[in-house]
Image (tube, rainbow, N blue to C red):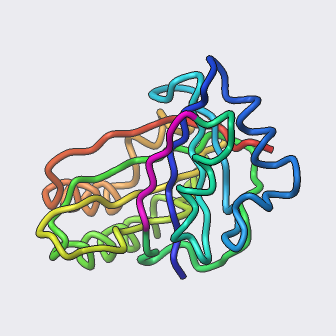
């Protein structure tokens, strides 16, 4: 299952016209790829940007999106799932979606995925907050020494995100070990576009 993360910039100041152009005909512009989720920014994303995750035949997604008159430019990163997602069902749950990119050595991808999967066992099972890691992707092209991974996590809101910064000790230990395998991260707070 191949995914694509695409960051779109609109020709104007907002993302609404661009979003409307993409979904006006049931996302046919993405075909034969399918939309897994489209997101607008709360923090870290410009007001004229959208983030789109597609799956399936994603090789030409960037070209098809740039061809829309309302899209100024697009950057696409081809991705492969590691331990999640396990389903191709599009995202639909309302809430806060945080995109976190990790700078990694490709040789560490499997270890980072294993540490994450183990951490999630206690991270997700608390009543202190509501959170669910939806995906942990690695770059599809790992021919170079270094690259990026993308973690997408759902929260019911910012309060849960903030509370989850102090997770169960077992999760925290695995997250610290994962952090030691990265050289940097950047995160974006978003909402799912209906």
Q: Residue at x 77, y 55 (%)?
A: 92
Task: Name the residue nearer the viewer: 118 or 76.
Answer: 76
| Image quarter of the C terminus | top right
Q: Give the dominant element type of the magenta stretch: helix, strand or loop.
A: strand
| Image quarter of the N terminus | bottom right
Task: Name the residue nearer the viewer: 82 or 120.
Answer: 82
Q: Residue 119 magenta-drawn?
A: no
Q: Residue at x 33, y 61 (%)?
A: 149
Residue 185 screen position, x and y as percent:
27, 44
Residue 172 quadrant: bottom left
Q: Residue 77 magenta-drawn?
A: yes
Q: Residue at x 43, y 68 (%)?
A: 79
Span highlighted in magenta in the image:
72-78
Task: Name the residue nearer the viewer: 94 or 37.
Answer: 37
Q: Is residue 55 above or below residue 102?
A: below
Residue 143 screen position, x and y as percent:
19, 76
Residue 89 screen position, x and y as percent:
73, 72
Q: Residue at x 36, y 67 (%)?
A: 116
Q: In this rendering, would 23 be left or right of 175?
A: right
Q: Is residue 32 above or below residue 128?
A: below
Name of the residue lying farthest toward the top? 13
Residue 27 screen position, x and y as percent:
79, 57
Task: Name the residue nearer the viewer: 148 or 118.
Answer: 148
């Amino acid at each position: 299952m191949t995914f694509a993360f695409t960051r779109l910039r609109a020709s104007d100041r907002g993302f609404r016209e661009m979003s409307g152009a993409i979904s006006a005909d049931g996302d046919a512009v993405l075909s034969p790829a399918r939309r897994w989720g489209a997101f607008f920014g709360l923090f870290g994303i410009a007001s004229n940007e959208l983030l789109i995750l597609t799956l399936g035949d994603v090789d030409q997604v960037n070209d098809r999106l740039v061809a829309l008159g309302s899209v100024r430019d697009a950057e696409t990163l081809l991705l492969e799932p590691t331990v999640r997602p396990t389903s191709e069902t599009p995202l639909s749950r309302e809430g806060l979606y945080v995109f976190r990119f990790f700078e990694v050595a490709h040789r560490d991808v499997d270890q980072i995925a294993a540490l994450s999967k183990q951490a999630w066992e206690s991270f997700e099972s608390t009543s202190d907050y509501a959170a669910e890691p939806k995906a942990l992707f690695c770059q599809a092209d790992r021919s170079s020494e270094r690259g990026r991974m993308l973690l997408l996590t759902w929260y019911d809101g910012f309060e849960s995100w903030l509370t989850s910064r102090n997770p169960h000790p077992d999760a925290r230990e695995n997250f610290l070990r994962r952090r030691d395998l990265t050289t940097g991260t950047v995160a974006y707070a978003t909402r799912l576009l209906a």
